[in-house]
Amino acid sequence: MLKIRLRRTGARNRAHYRIVVSGSRRRPGSQILEEIGHYDPVPNPPRLRLDGDRARFWIARGASPSPTVRDLLGREAPVS
């Protein structure tokens, strides 16, 4: 089963996340299938770059988003 989830990057107290597709039994920091976006919660307002088409593609293929990613999909921003 596939999972769409956040992978933490960045320094201590300066979190930055990548939105990735990986196997559900793998650790979040292990090998991924595809990176579909970025999320930076530190600035006000938080910055979100997410490829919604790719997210919908993976969801149609059986990937399930984590609760946080599901919330981010609800406020999806267009890819520039």
Image (cartoon, helix red, strand yellow):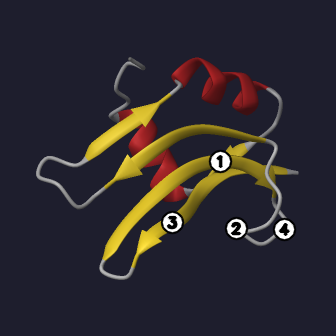
In the rendered structure, are the residues bearing label 2 and label 4 in contact, judged by CB atoms less than 8 Å apart?
A: yes
Q: Position of residue 59 (x, y in %)?
A: 71, 32
Q: Quadrant of the C terminus?
A: top left
Which mark, residue 45? none
Q: Nearer the viewer, residue 3 or 7?
A: 7
Badge 2, how many Cα within 10 Å: few under 14, some, many 20+? Answer: some
Q: Nearer the viewer, residue 20 or 55?
A: 20
Quickly name the residue at label 2: 28
Give the label, 3 or 4, closer to the camera. 3
**Relative to 10, residue 6 above or below:** above
User: How far is the residue under mark 1 from the one under mark 3?
Assistant: 12 Å
Quickly name the residue at label 3: 9
Name which of mark 3 and mark 2 comes first in the sequence.
3
Name which of mark 1 and mark 3 comes first in the sequence.
3
Q: Which amino acid, mark 2?
A: Pro
Quickly name the residue at label 4: 26
Taking the spot 53% from the left edge, 24% from the top edge, the residue there is 52
Q: Which of 63 and 37 is in front in this view?
A: 37
User: How far is the residue under mark 3 from the one under mark 4?
Assistant: 17 Å
Q: Which amino acid, mark 1?
A: Val
Taking the spot 27% from the left edge, 43% from the top edge, the residue there is 47
Give the label, 1 or 3, closer to the camera. 3
Quickly name the residue at label 1: 20
In the rendered structure, are the residues bearing label 3 and label 4 in contact, judged by CB atoms less than 8 Å apart?
A: no
